[in-house]
Image (cartoon, rainbow, N blue to C red):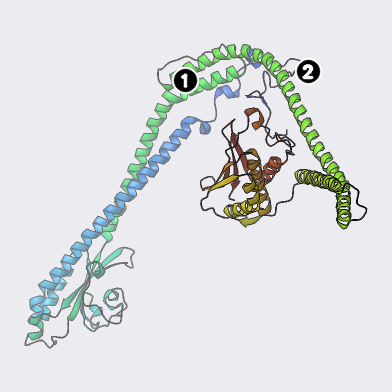
């Protein structure tokens, strides 16, 4: 038997022992003994004992991890805080701008109704003098600037696609109502700071359209728009200052945390780890007497205590290793005997294979003379029927010929089965249904069932089609049914069930007879070639069944006992 497993010594990995060489195997010459590292005296202190580079130390890695984690966490929450602060500041400014726009609108309302434009303009100019207000403008319904604190803009037309007008005039039909969020806009000034713009439509009240001095018709909904622009330079400066302060705070917090971590690591981790590294290097060179001092009761102290226990155990383990070497030699000898037994089984299997080849040759050579004998028997029967050269005892002679013909046919059938066994046919897979193949097989053996007084109790369930060789699967069913009929000499019941197991991707056809059953000593040999308990059997029927099912990647399960009948299950994969 050939296996691909890596060699193991009875469950123990074949690892180097002692100085890196394998233990001597029985039957092989032993080389010079290798040095035992557990008994080698310690050497001088090397560079490994003096510690590693600072950037490879565990302290540096932990400090770096803490610093990065602190930076990421602080940066994340700082970003959230600054973003929230900026949002809150923008909302406050928008609210103040909206209130300022509404205040201007209400302050000039009565002057506009009374057509006192100069008073209204003075009010707006006075309000525009407040800190942070860039300018105040009023647009007419046609887009002309009717008032502006910037005198050069008076009377000019505004592009309706400009940023101040786009909210209403984005479509062909201007909007009459705007939400608070769509009335504001933020853009950059020439000097680089942000500017907030807020528009406020002036609607045509009944007082405006009915006044004696006004000429606006009642159908005109919007008379104009108040547009104010506010400087956000101060607010931007506050945001920048808050960002700088936050960055300084983050830097100081990271620096403080790192300093605390450095001091803690050096005291509680760095020094104990260096002692452990030094002790490990000394033990690796054979100094099993080295003891690490225990100065704490925490995990590092527990580790040092475990290290000291380990060095004591290593000395005992060295003696056990030498004992194991002797034990392994004995086990290798035992395993060698087992391998010889396996080799004998392989040779026996090769002999069986050779026997199969010889049987195939013999069967072929026997089949040719049998054909000649059978031909002459038929010729003699024909002459007797024609009355030519008939002997005096014709009837007895005819009986002899009939017996010879039956025996020749029986021998020919044995030869045919032998050829089928030694030269199995190639599978010709087709998608087929096992229930249908079972029905076709039952039709073929109907006469056998009737003559054997065997009743069939069929219990099938729907089965999906699977790829099989239909003719060979029918041969399996026929062989099993015939075998069951011959087992039930006085008749009985043959129960046939089919089952689909989606979880295991299998289909099962089970044949259960009511025969005498198979003794336990014969149960393991039912599939052996030429093994049979019947007087006229060849012992090849179930061997052929086993071979066909195996080639279909299936299996055959047999359950039986004396007096309990026999149950044979054919299990085939659906894929």
Image height check: is 372 above or below 217? above
Residue 406 visible to the viewer: yes
Dividing the picture into quarters, in which one does residue 105 lie? Answer: bottom left
> Which residue in the protein does label 1 denote?
303
Is residue 68 part of the magenta span, yes or no?
no
> Which residue in the protein does label 2 denote?
27
How far across and down, in percent of the image, does residue 538 sit?
A: 75, 39
Mark 1, other Cα within 10 Å: few <14 / some 14–19 / many ≥20: some
Tell which tag, 1 or 2, sits nearer the viewer: 2
User: Which residue occupies the foreground of this view, 429 or 23?
Assistant: 429
Point 49% across, 23% down: residue: 273
Q: Give the side of residue 493 with respect to residue 295, left or right.
A: right
Dividing the picture into quarters, in which one does residue 556 lie? Answer: top right
Q: Give the side of residue 307 with respect to residue 400, left or right.
A: left
User: Which residue occupies the foreground of this view, 138 or 485?
Assistant: 485
Q: Which type of secondary structure does the marked residue at label 2 adopt?
A: loop
Tell me the tag on residue 521: none
How far across and down, in percent of the image, does residue 304 sit?
A: 48, 18
Q: Which type of secondary structure does the marked residue at label 1 adopt?
A: helix
Point 66% across, 13% down: residue: 322
Mark 2, other Cα within 10 Å: few <14 / some 14–19 / many ≥20: few
Point 56% across, 33% down: residue: 564
- Which residues lie in the magenta part? 512-519
Contact (Cβ within 8 Å) of mark 1 with mark 2: no
Is residue 516 part of the magenta span, yes or no?
yes
């Amino acid at each position: 038997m050939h296996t691909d497993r890596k060699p193991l010594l009875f469950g123990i990995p074949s690892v180097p022992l002692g100085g890196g060489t394998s233990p001597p195997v029985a039957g092989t010459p032993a080389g010079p003994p290798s040095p035992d590292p557990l008994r080698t005296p310690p050497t001088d202190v090397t560079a490994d004992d003096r510690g590693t580079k600072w950037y490879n130390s565990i302290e540096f890695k932990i400090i770096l991890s803490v610093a990065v984690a602190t930076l990421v966490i602080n940066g994340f929450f700082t970003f959230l805080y600054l973003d929230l602060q900026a949002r809150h500041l923008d909302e406050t400014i928008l609210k103040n701008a909206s209130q300022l726009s509404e205040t201007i609108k209400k302050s000039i309302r009565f002057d506009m109704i009374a057509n006192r434009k100069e008073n209204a303009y003075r009010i707006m100019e006075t309000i525009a003098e407040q800190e942070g207000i860039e300018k105040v403008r009023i647009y007419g319904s046609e887009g002309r600037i009717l008032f502006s604190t910037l005198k050069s803009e008076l009377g000019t037309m505004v592009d309706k696609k400009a940023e101040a007008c786009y909210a209403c005039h984005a479509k062909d039909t201007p909007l009459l109502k705007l939400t608070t969020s769509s009335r504001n806009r933020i853009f950059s000034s020439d000097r680089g700071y942000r500017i907030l713009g807020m528009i406020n439509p002036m609607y045509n009240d009944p007082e405006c359209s009915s006044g004696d001095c006004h000429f606006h018709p009642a159908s005109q909904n919007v008379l104009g728009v108040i547009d104010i622009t506010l400087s956000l330079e101060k607010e931007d400066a506050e945001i920048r200052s808050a960002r700088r302060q936050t960055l300084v705070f983050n830097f100081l917090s990271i620096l403080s945390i790192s300093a605390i971590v450095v001091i803690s690591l050096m005291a509680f981790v760095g020094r104990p780890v260096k002692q452990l590294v030094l002790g490990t290097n000394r033990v690796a060179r054979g100094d099993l007497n080295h003891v690490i001092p225990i100065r704490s009761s925490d995990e590092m102290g527990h580790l040092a205590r475990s290290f000291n226990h380990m060095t004591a155990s290593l000395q005992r383990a060295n003696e056990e290793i030498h004992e194991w070497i002797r034990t392994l030699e004995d086990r290798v000898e035992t395993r060698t005997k087992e391998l010889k037994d396996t080799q004998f089984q392989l040779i026996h299997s090769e002999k069986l294979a050779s026997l199969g080849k010889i049987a195939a040759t013999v069967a072929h050579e026997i089949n040719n003379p049998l054909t000649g004998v059978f031909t002459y028997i038929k010729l003699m029967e024909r002459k007797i029927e024609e009355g030519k050269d008939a002997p005096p005892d014709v009837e007895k002679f005819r009986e002899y010929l009939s017996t010879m013909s039956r025996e020749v046919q029986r021998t020919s059938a044995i030869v045919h089965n032998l050829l089928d066994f030694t030269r199995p046919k190639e599978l010709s897979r087709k998608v087929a249904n096992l229930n249908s193949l079972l029905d076709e097989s039952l039709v073929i053996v109907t006469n056998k069932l009737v003559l054997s007084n065997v009743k069939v109790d069929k219990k099938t369930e729907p089965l999906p089609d699977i790829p099989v060789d239909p003719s060979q699967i029918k041969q399996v069913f026929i062989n099993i049914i015939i075998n069951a009929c011959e087992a039930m000499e006085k008749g009985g019941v043959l129960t046939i069930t089919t089952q689909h197991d989606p979880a295991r991707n299998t289909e099962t056809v089970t044949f259960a007879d009511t025969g005498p059953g198979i003794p336990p000593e014969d149960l393991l040999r039912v599939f052996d070639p030429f093994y049979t308990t019947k007087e006229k059997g060849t012992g090849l029927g179930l061997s052929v069944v086993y071979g066909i099912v195996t080639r279909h990647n299936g299996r055959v399960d047999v359950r039986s006992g004396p007096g309990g009948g026999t149950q044979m299950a054919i299990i085939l994969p659906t894929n």
